[in-house]
Image (tube, rainbow, N blue to C red):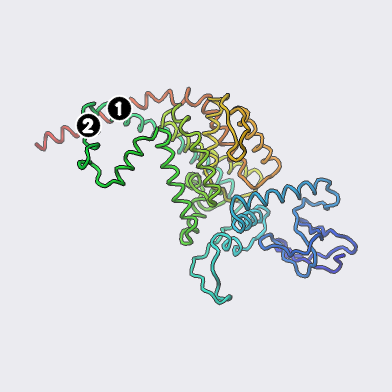
């Protein structure tokens, strides 16, 4: 059927000849099944020289007709392709996942499809158009340095989580101190002054409405909206060609990248597709008020940030274990930490699916199903989502709800006393300096 056909494999630079009378071309890393007339898509590592029929399929040193599970894998691959295009757009998702897949298999993938998928340039000089947007180059990962990157990630996670909870403790002390120093008559006078028509402290009706809206929010919503705003700004930067190279370098978490530590934090606020951004913010808004009411806004923000970094660390560890580097981004890991905390503290709460009305299940069942799904994704090698990050975030939320508040946050009194002594010394020093100046 395909006798005399040649295929040039870019990963090994060797010519493979089709076996006479066979539909399968067996190589060390690739198999080509003669089943359709479509040409091979760019970015997958193999370039057809003269192939009338061909379809690229990943193999593990065995022929496709000997693997009885390859039809199931083919169907699952099609389903994951459809989901990826829904999550990242038709062009964006296709080229992004093809590029990451090629990097995972050690294949040098061309950067042009990924660049076009990101920015969709209007035209090139060869086509008679003008392309003024800067080029975005996907940096080739160094697999040999992944172990050192993982060590850096562990040290950074330990220091970041410790400093985050210290900062949250100081923030809680300052909020309590501020409330104690404010007198009731001062709050009443300020409220009456702002409600007097024509004598508002804040000028303009727009600022007045924003002030009233903000004061009407609960503690969870006051934490959610700044997080949502930061995510929206980062999403807008992804759609600006001038920032895309910077976004790839600092807002994507990758254990084999040049920058390893701070992208673990920045990637928590990074979304490439609007659907991904909208769904994450919807889920966070659904659970933030309840969780923040259980622990307070200071502790909530600390847990959210630590959940994002720890989920990035879990993603790094899994990628190093399977030797498959690749960029990851999104707030899903931190949100899974919030979800794990909520489902552990409120196991009997009823949850549902947003687009499927009439179906409800307990929070405990939902958490178990999600964790089982992420575990299956890690074992089966599904690459649409970063299942290791999701599972790491959920485990952190579960453990923090069970032990974190009891053994970590409840024992912050010595730190608060130390900060109180420091603030008292600072106030006495400033008062003594003012008296000396007088």
| CB-based contact (under 8 Å), mark 1 and mark 2 | no
Residue 265 in the image: x percent, y percent?
48, 44
Query: In what quadrant of the picture does the N terminus appear?
Result: bottom right
Q: Is residue 350 left or right of residue 261?
A: right
Residue 2 in the image: x percent, y percent?
85, 65
Q: Is residue 106 left or right of residue 68?
A: left
Badge count? 2
Earlier-in-chain disc, 1 versus 2: 1
Q: Is residue 367 left or right of residue 28?
A: left
**Hey, which quadrant is residue 318 in on the image?**
top right
Tell me: residue 177, above or below residue 15. Answer: above
Q: Is residue 438 left or right of residue 195?
A: left
Of the pair 334 and 215, the residue shown nearer to us? 215
Q: Residue furthest right?
A: 21
Q: In terms of secondary structure, where does tag 2 sit?
A: helix
Of the pair 406 and 75, the residue shown nearer to us? 75
Q: Label 2 neighbourhood size at 10 Å, few (<14), some (14-19), many (20+)? A: few
Q: In terms of secondary structure, where does tag 1 sit?
A: helix
Of the pair 218 and 58, the residue shown nearer to us? 218
Residue 40 in the image: x percent, y percent?
72, 63
Mark 2 lies on residue: 427
Tell me: residue 18, above or below residue 224. Answer: below
Question: Residue at image x 48%, y 61%?
Answer: 241
Tell me: residue 9, above or below residue 437. Answer: below
Q: How far apart, in angstroms, are the residues tagged by discs 1 and 2?
A: 10 Å
Looking at the rendered structure, which numbered label has been put on residue 420? 1
Q: Label 1 neighbourhood size at 10 Å, few (<14), some (14-19), many (20+)? A: some
Question: Residue at image x 54%, y 68%?
Answer: 122
Residue 32 in the image: x percent, y percent?
79, 59
Looking at the rendered structure, which numbered label has been put on residue 382? none
Question: Residue at image x 31%, y 31%?
Answer: 174
């Amino acid at each position: 059927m395909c006798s005399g056909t040649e295929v040039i494999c870019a990963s090994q630079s060797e010519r493979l000849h089709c076996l006479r009378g066979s539909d399968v071309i067996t190589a060390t890393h690739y198999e080509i099944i003669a089943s359709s007339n479509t040409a091979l898509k760019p970015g997958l590592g193999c370039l057809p020289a003269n192939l009338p029929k061909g379809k690229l399929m990943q193999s593990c040193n065995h022929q496709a007709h000997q693997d009885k599970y390859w039809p199931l894998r083919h169907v699952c691959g099609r389903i994951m392709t459809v989901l990826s295009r829904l999550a990242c757009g038709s062009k964006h998702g296709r080229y992004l996942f093809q590029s990451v897949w090629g990097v995972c298999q050690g294949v040098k993938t061309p950067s042009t499809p990924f660049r076009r998928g990101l920015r969709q340039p209007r035209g090139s000089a060869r086509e008679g158009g003008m392309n003024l947007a800067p080029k975005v180059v996907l940096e080739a990962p160094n697999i040999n340095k992944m172990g050192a990157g993982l060590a850096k990630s562990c040290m950074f996670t330990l220091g970041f989580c410790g400093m985050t909870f210290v900062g949250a403790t100081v923030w809680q002390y300052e909020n309590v101190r501020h409330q104690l120093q404010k007198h009731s008559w001062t709050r009443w006078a300020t409220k009456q002054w702002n409600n007097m028509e024509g004598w508002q402290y804040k000028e303009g009706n727009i600022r007045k409405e924003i002030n009233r809206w903000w004061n009407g929010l609960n503690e969870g919503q006051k934490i959610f909206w700044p997080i949502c705003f930061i995510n929206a700004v980062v999403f807008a930067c992804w759609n600006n060609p001038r920032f895309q190279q910077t976004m790839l370098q600092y807002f994507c978490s990758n254990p084999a990248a040049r920058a390893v530590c701070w992208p673990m934090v920045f990637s928590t606020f990074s979304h490439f597709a609007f659907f991904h951004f909208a769904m994450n913010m919807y889920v966070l808004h659904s659970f933030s008020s309840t969780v923040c009411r259980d622990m307070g806004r200071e502790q909530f923000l600390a847990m959210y940030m630590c959940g994002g970094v720890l989920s990035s660390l879990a993603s790094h560890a899994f990628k190093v274990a399977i030797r498959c580097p690749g960029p990851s981004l999104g707030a899903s890991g931190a949100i899974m930490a919030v979800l794990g905390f909520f489902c552990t503290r409120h196991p009997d709460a009823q949850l549902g699916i947003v687009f499927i009305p009439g179906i409800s299940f307990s929070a405990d069942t939902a958490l178990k199903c999600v964790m089982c799904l992420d575990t299956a994704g890690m074992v089966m090698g599904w690459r649409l989502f970063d299942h290791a990050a999701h599972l790491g975030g959920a485990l952190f939320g579960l453990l923090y709800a069970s032990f974190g508040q009891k053994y970590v946050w409840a024992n912050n009194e010595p730190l608060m006393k130390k900060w109180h002594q420091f603030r008292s010394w600072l106030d006495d020093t400033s008062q003594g300096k003012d008296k000396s100046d007088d």
